[in-house]
């Protein structure tokens, strides 16, 4: 009995759910975990191929989209895959669980995990981005492919688009402003088992590791990535303005057909302009001031809730908030001509 007490206790088996947030580096994590699948198996962590997309982001959106009654069978397959490789840690990753929180069945998944895998400890982790960047980046993603379940046809049918109306739609749907980090944190906490959620900043200055991916690997007891990960290609503001304008002229199915050629076509007829801040794409000075006021009000609560520092996460952006029109009438005419020629 004394000898048994002196032996090191075996770590409990764990299921980690990385749930986003959207536009906070999820694809970087998913790309690395998919590419290091075999290496991580040797270290006792399984990023299951079961119910994971085989291409694209290689995340667990097939699992996130399952009906609640189908989750037990899916989790049995995932547990079996981990057991085959002798893994005591499982990682599931998909930002759909927060991108579409009210339809993403995250709470149902957490409940199913507790019932189907009672001997596994459940941990959920969400990374947060500075809210000034989050607001602008999420509107850009919404224009490209949709985000947060906001109805794109209704949005573009309601009048001139812009980041202000996008933020209003988010608040109407979710009940708190998109730049409110506290709103996101409380939304997640309310639907998840107490003590299971870990909130972290993805701002490098808030982390002990060099970057978010290294921080995430450390959290899971994995070695840091050997080199900096590839970043997703960034679309210039001028192209985003073109994407926004085209969607005011055509339906979403037609836009989906035009998008590949729209992204490749150069409508500037010469060198593109510098990184100007578009009047409809970016925050205005008034919007930025409102975010600053909100951050100041939330700062203390965020510091208490987060497992990382939040100084950079809550830092006000020091920049010129001036805006410009990125499309003149000549550019709009060329885009209308493009639509006429390319539309089915």
Image (spheres, grey):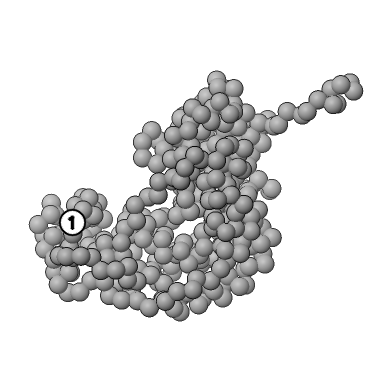
Residue 267 or residue 163, whichever sits in front: 267
Q: Is 152 drawn above or below residue 232 in the view shown?
A: below
Q: Residue at x 29, y 68 (%)?
A: 274
Residue 238: horizontal and vertical position, in percent? 27, 65
The residue identified by callout 1 is 265
Residue 161: horizontal and vertical position, in percent? 32, 69
Q: Is 44 drawn above or below residue 326 in the view shown?
A: above
Q: Residue at x 55, y 40 (%)?
A: 224
- Single out the residue that lies furthest toward the right: 2
Residue 34: horizontal and vertical position, in percent? 45, 35
Quick one: quadrant of the N terminus? top right
Residue 198 or residue 221, whichever sits in front: 221
Q: Residue at x 15, y 65 (%)?
A: 269
Residue 111 visible? The answer is no
**Residues packed near mark 1 inside 10 Å, few (<14), some (14 to 19) or many (20 plus):** few
Secondary structure of the residue carrying numbered label 1: loop
Does 327 sit left or right of 319 as displayed?
left
Image mark count: 1
Does 336 sit left or right of 59 as displayed?
left
- Single out the residue that lies furthest toward the left: 341
Q: Residue at x 65, y 45 (%)?
A: 196
Does 156 sit left or right of 340 as displayed?
right
Residue 316 visible? The answer is yes
Residue 303 or residue 71, whichever sits in front: 303
Q: Is 155 drawn above or below residue 104 in the view shown?
A: below
Residue 72 or residue 121, whichever sits in front: 121
Residue 77: horizontal and vertical position, in percent? 51, 26
């Amino acid at each position: 009995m004394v000898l048994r007490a002196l032996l090191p206790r075996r770590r409990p088996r764990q299921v980690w759910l990385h749930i986003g947030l959207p536009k906070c580096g999820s694809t970087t994590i998913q790309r690395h975990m998919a590419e290091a699948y075999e290496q991580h198996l040797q270290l006792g962590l399984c990023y299951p191929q079961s119910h994971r997309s085989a291409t694209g982001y290689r995340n667990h959106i097939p699992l996130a989209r399952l009906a609640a009654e189908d989750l037990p069978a899916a989790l049995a397959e995932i547990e079996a895959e981990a057991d085959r490789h002798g893994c005591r840690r499982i990682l599931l990753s998909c930002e759909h669980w927060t991108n579409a929180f009210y339809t993403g069945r995250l709470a149902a998944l957490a409940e199913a995990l507790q019932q189907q895998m009672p001997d596994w400890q459940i941990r959920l982790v969400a990374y947060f981005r500075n809210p000034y960047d989050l607001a602008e980046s999420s509107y850009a993603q919404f224009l490209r492919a949709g985000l947060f379940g906001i109805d794109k046809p209704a949005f573009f049918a309601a009048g001139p688009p812009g980041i202000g109306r996008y933020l209003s739609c988010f608040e109407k749907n979710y009940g708190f402003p998109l730049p409110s980090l506290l709103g996101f944190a409380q939304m997640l906490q309310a639907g998840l088992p107490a003590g299971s959620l870990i909130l972290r900043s993805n701002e490098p200055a808030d982390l002990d590791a060099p970057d978010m991916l290294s921080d995430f690997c450390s959290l899971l007891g994995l070695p840091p990535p050997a080199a900096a990960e590839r970043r997703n290609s960034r679309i210039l503001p001028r192209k985003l303005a073109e994407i926004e304008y085209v969607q005011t002229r055509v339906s979403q199915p037609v836009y989906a057909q035009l998008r590949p050629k729209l992204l490749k076509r150069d409508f500037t007829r010469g060198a593109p302009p510098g990184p100007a801040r578009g009047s409809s794409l970016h925050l205005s000075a008034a919007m930025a001031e409102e975010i600053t006021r909100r951050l100041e009000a939330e700062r203390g609560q965020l510091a208490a809730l987060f497992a990382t520092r939040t100084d950079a996460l809550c830092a006000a952006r020091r920049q010129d908030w001036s805006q410009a029109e990125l499309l003149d009438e000549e550019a709009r005419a060329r885009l209308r001509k493009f639509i006429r020629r390319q539309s089915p």
